[in-house]
Image (tube, helix red, strand yellow):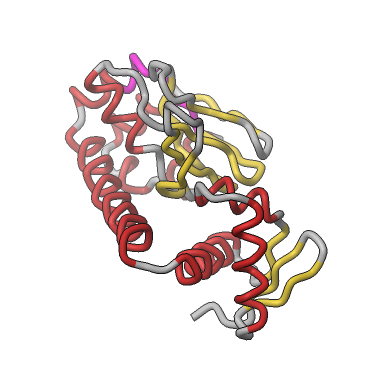
């Protein structure tokens, strides 16, 4: 089972037979329900997750007021690159990772992942490519937070959520969106109403329908 899912979702890691064999030997598959925290800010890394289904989000939590801001997503075929870099440095995690939709994850024990990194350049290539991808996502977040007005930031967030989940109707709440964006429910409700008036979305109880995903 692990061999097949690695072939499907992480083909770069299976081009080296020895690396694939070792990953199969040390890994296990776990199921996590939506809302499960798989990495806590301030904790040490115990496992490296390789997502094979569902969706996860990575947040930065402000230590003073506890507000959180969404940094990037983890999709099938990806891992939490911050977990890997933090593990290598033997530091406490600076981010929090939460399962957004019910997920299946290939789990690699942290100590085994360190051994893999030392033995196989292909693993490090995979992490390097993932780091570049997530760095671009972080730049997008910074651009939206710094240079965009709140309307645009919210609309871009909704479009990305819809594209990642493969549907133009999002089952969510104003409070959930506020949490992701580090805002308040009242502000999000006002902005959503404004976006609806402008024809970008259609609001229903517990749902937001996007009119145009482009």
Camera-nearest residue between 206 and 166: 206
Residue at x 32%, y 59% (from the top left corner): 146
| Front residue (pair 176, 57) | 176
**Relative vertical location of residue 155 with respect to residue 121 in this rendering, above or below:** below
Give the left or right position of residue 184, taking residue 110 as reference: right
Quadrant where the N terminus is found in the figure:
top right
Q: Which residue lies furthest to the right in this view?
A: 205
Q: Where is residue 134 in the image (x, y as percent from the top left)?
A: 32, 50
What percent of the width, then of the height, locates residue 135?
27, 50
Pick the residue in front: 54 or 65. Answer: 65
Drawn side of residue 27 relative to residue 118, left or right? right
Front-most of 35 and 177?
A: 177
Count of marks overlaid on the render? 0
Q: Looking at the image, which residue is at 63% across and 81% down?
A: 211
Residue 30 position in % (x across, y down): 60, 29
In magenta segment, residue 96 = no
45 left or right of 202 in image = left
Q: Is residue 89 left or right of residue 11?
A: left
Image quadrant where residue 212 sits? bottom right
- State which region is magenta: 106-113
Residue drawn at x 66%, y 42% as measured from the top left? 102
User: Which residue is found at the position 41% from the left and 27% from the top?
Assistant: 48
Residue 190 x/y as whole percent: 64, 66
10 over 165 or under it: above or below = above
């Amino acid at each position: 089972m692990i061999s097949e899912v690695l072939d499907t979702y992480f083909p770069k890691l299976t081009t080296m037979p020895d690396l694939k064999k070792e990953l199969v030997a040390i890994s296990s598959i776990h199921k996590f329900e939506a809302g499960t925290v798989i990495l806590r800010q301030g904790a040490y890394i115990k496992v490296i997750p390789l997502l094979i289904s569902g969706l996860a989000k990575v947040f930065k939590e402000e230590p003073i007021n506890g507000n959180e801001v969404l940094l990037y997503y983890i999709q099938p075929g990806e891992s939490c690159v911050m977990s890997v870099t933090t593990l290598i440095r033997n530091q406490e995690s600076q981010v929090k990772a939460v399962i957004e939709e019910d997920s299946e994850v290939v789990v690699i024990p942290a100590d085994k992942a360190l051994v893999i990194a030392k033995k196989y350049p292909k693993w490090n290539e995979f992490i390097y490519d993932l780091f570049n991808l997530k760095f671009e996502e972080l730049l997008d977040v910074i651009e939206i937070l710094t240079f965009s007005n709140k309307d645009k930031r919210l609309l871009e967030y909704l479009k990305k959520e819809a594209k990642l989940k493969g549907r133009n109707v999002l089952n969510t709440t104003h409070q959930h969106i506020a949490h992701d964006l580090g805002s308040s429910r009242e502000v999000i409700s006002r902005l959503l109403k404004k976006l609806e008036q402008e024809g970008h979305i259609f609001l229903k109880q517990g749902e937001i329908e996007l009119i145009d995903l482009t």
